Image (tube, rainbow, N blue to C red):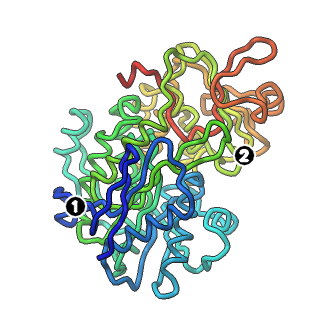
Amino acid sequence: MMGYICRDLEGTTRSGPGPVRRTFGGRHGTMATYAQRSGEALALTGQDVREILEQGLAALGRRLRRVLVLPPDFTRFHSHAGEITALLYRMLSPAVQVDILPALGTHFPMTEGEIRTMFGPDIPLERFFEHDWRHGVDHVGTVPGALLREWSEGRLDYSVDVLTNRMLFGGYDLILSVGQIVPHEVVGMANYTKNILVGVGGPDMINKSHFLGAVYNMERIMGRADTPVRRLYNYGVTAFLSGLPIVYILTVMAKNRTTGRMEMRGLYVGDDDATFAAGVGLSQRVNLDLLAAPLRKVVVYLDPHEFKSTWLGNKSVYRTRMAIADDGDLIVLAPGLREFGEDAEIDRLIRAYGYRGTPALLAAVDANEDLRRNLSAAAHLIHGSSEGRFRITYCPGPGMSAEAIRGVGFEAEDLGAMMRRYDPARLQDGPNVLPDGEEVFFISNPALGLWALRSQFA
């Protein structure tokens, strides 16, 4: 077995004859970190990434004929997963059949243009497959309600069906789950087992896990590794999918504050909790923007190519809510907004029930079967409300009317006027003072981090 080089979080280098082995209860008995390189000041190059992937694949020591890659979709464009997937394809094919199943979750399918923008021109389109979260999954087991009661501290006691895309059972020699570790509103820190049970998962797990996070309180979850939802995902994969040859390729990305470019601070290849935990530690250091005092006015820009729905655009709410002052303002510049949900039924539910706050939403769940059948939508409506604590003003482009915005419980303003006042091309990420003295805190992409008060993570 080939040797490898592994750099720890402090940047020191270790080498050895094989992977870092850990005895850790779970999928393959003895599991491993096969390769990693990480550090708060690192900016990994394309050559670095290739070397780490080569080290990880060599350390696996498996003869490969068919490989399935599970990257995120276009909504995670900045994860660098597109480049990694394209590199894996070049490294493995044509000797190995490489199939690619983007982890859509409930999102819109990727267009050909999005596929080419994210994954490049070289992978044949017939190698990409579309995840159908409602009909393309198999049931593999059930998480008992007693565990949900324990994890939710008595708030919920339903059982949860574990479902995942049936392609995973297609006899692949290796399944590579590729994605970014970053603070997340539902699970705490994104990726790892979430990619298997939500990204390519099915309705019961998606609906009930999202609702679990909402009733537990997202502000107790965001930016944290050990949460009720994380326990649910890890249990589901360990208990029911231990026979699958899943290996995770996890990135940690951060914006260079001087150049504005996204840089890779860490890359991890492994199949155990400790691999994920190492990445979480780095992400918490580079992706959490912890502030000394609450913010009175926050302006968030939503890239029109990435954010076309409030289902995604409400990251502007989730990722800033812990930092916004009582009676403060969140202004969302949303030129590409065209829908509320990424799924026709979820879009209908958002329009019907709106972002009205937790008490109103829980009453609506009790009274309406359509919401009970779609608890992920219910959770989203809880997450997207300020609970009356601060104002949320959406400024939509031509694809969404101000009346529709107001109809779901947000305030609305004219995009052109607000873009002239809060010009994303002129504002810097972080605090800004306008010519008339107004102070605003600007965020150019809410998906890249979490903004909160230092006292909340003390």
Seen at 64% across and 76% down, the residue is: 122
Front residue of 117/454: it is 454
> Residue at point 65% right, 46% down?
261
Disc 1 designates what residue? 21
Q: Measuring from the top left, give residue 268's x and y in whole percent.
A: 39, 57
At label 1, which amino acid type do we have? Arg
Above or below, 16 relative to 217: below
Identify the image quadrant of the N terminus: bottom left
Residue farthest along the bottom direction in this orientation: 95
> What secondary structure is marked by label 1?
strand
Q: Is residue 131 left or right of residue 195?
A: right
Q: Position of residue 291 (x, y in %)?
A: 50, 21
Report the side of 401 relative to 149 (left or right).
right
Q: Is residue 146 left or right of residue 363?
A: left
Residue 249 pos. (x, y %) = 42, 61
The residue under label 2 is 336
Residue in the foreground of this view, choosing between 98 and 34? 34
Q: Residue at x 61, y 25 (%)?
A: 392
In the rendered picture of this protein, how many numbered marks are placed on residues? 2
To which quarter of the image does residue 33 belong?
Answer: bottom left
In the displayed structure image, the side of residue 368 where residue 128 appears, left or right: right
Please say whether residue 239 is visible from this viewpoint: no
